[in-house]
Amino acid sequence: MIRVGIVGGTGYTGAELLRLLARHPQAELAVITSRTEAGLPVAEMFPHLRGQLDLCFTEPDRGALAECDLVFFATPNGTAMQSVPELLESGTRVIDLAADFRLTDPAVWEQWYGMPHHCPDLLAEAVYGLPEIKREAIRSARLIANPGCYPTAVTLGFLPLLEQRAVDPTWLIADAKSGVSGAGRKAETNLLMAEVGESFKAYAVSGHRHLPEITQNLETFAGMAINLTFVPHLVPMIRGIEATLYARLTDTSLDLTALYQSRYANEPFVDVLTSGSPDTRSVRGSNYCRIAVARQGNSVIVQSVIDNLVKGAAGQAVQNMNLMFGLDETLGLEALALLP
């Protein structure tokens, strides 16, 4: 059994990790920390876990965490990097679901996150935890930077085109929409039902924090600098991301659907449609990314949908855990989407 700790178990991502790990046949939940809820039974905060989990939240204790085989950080940006060096030194492996180790350049991190990096020496070691591109490196990693939700949907959508040099990398557009759970479990006026319901808006138009992460990924595949326009939107639903991606074809002879089917043929959690458009409810509660690709003249349109809390966060983290500990990659992630 893998002895698991979770730092920051009270948010939506933490709750999703608890839901998945409580039923995982090879994971033993040992520690769940929360400074504000220490002493509270987890099942009191999350009643859907009644009868499945009898742990209480505890104050963060590095000694207790160091006794775990693996620690997940489901914490705000800038938190994990304070503790990760000591945990790695003790032999504990780490998966960080925040952005602390996603960017390879500490100056870029400071620019976008407004704080210096606490352990920049670990950025080169951290493995970006998108299994579809880093599977073998994940297996032997000590430290995983779990990808962001928007970067997961956008990267998987553009990946086959850029790998094949099939599109102009200087003209890429990602028009993405997310449910409100992507903003986290917090009380803010702009996230109230009365504010979000029956409404639709773009946000962070001048630059979202996920932009440098997406750009870093896509430039790796393109082999050159790219020009990406990324605009996120907030839609009145709880879960889900839909990314509509646009690019200009440089090779119009390609069978685009065949290209995507070939690239993802052996990927257990990427499903390429041969017709129609994927919708977010088709992946809600599951670890799938569902993709469709179409053409309009010399333009290609890719539609990529995920559940932002599963493949965009906790599910992908569990997928990485499975790889790190030599388990079947799909273990504990076999749940189908909820419909309706």
Image (cartoon, rainbow, N blue to C red):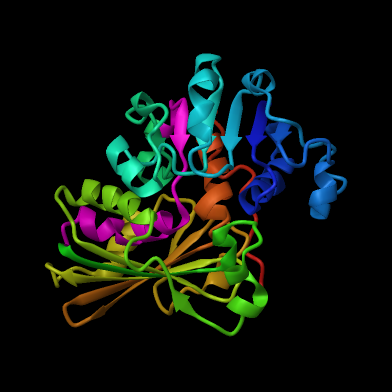
Residue 149 in the magenta stretch? The answer is yes
Check the image and name the residue furthest to the right. 51
Q: Over which residues does the magenta segment extend?
A: 138-167
Residue toward you, 338 or 110? 110
Residue at 79% x, 52% y: name it: 46
Residue at 46% x, 29% y: name it: 143
Residue toward you, 163 or 11? 11
Please indicate whether residue 73 sits to the left or right of residue 112 in the image.
right
Q: Is residue 171 visible?
A: yes
Indicate the position of residue 142 as horizontal and vertical percent values.
46, 25
Please indicate whether residue 12 sits to the left or right of residue 257 in the image.
right
What is the quadrant of the C terminus in the image?
Answer: bottom right
Residue toward you, 50 or 162? 50
Q: Quadrant of residue 8?
A: top right
Q: Is residue 105 visible?
A: no
Check the image and name the residue furthest to the top. 90
What is the quadrant of the N terminus in the image?
Answer: top right
Please indicate whether residue 299 sits to the left or right of residue 75 in the image.
left
Residue at 65% x, 79% y: name it: 194
Indicate the position of residue 119 as horizontal and vertical percent values.
40, 26
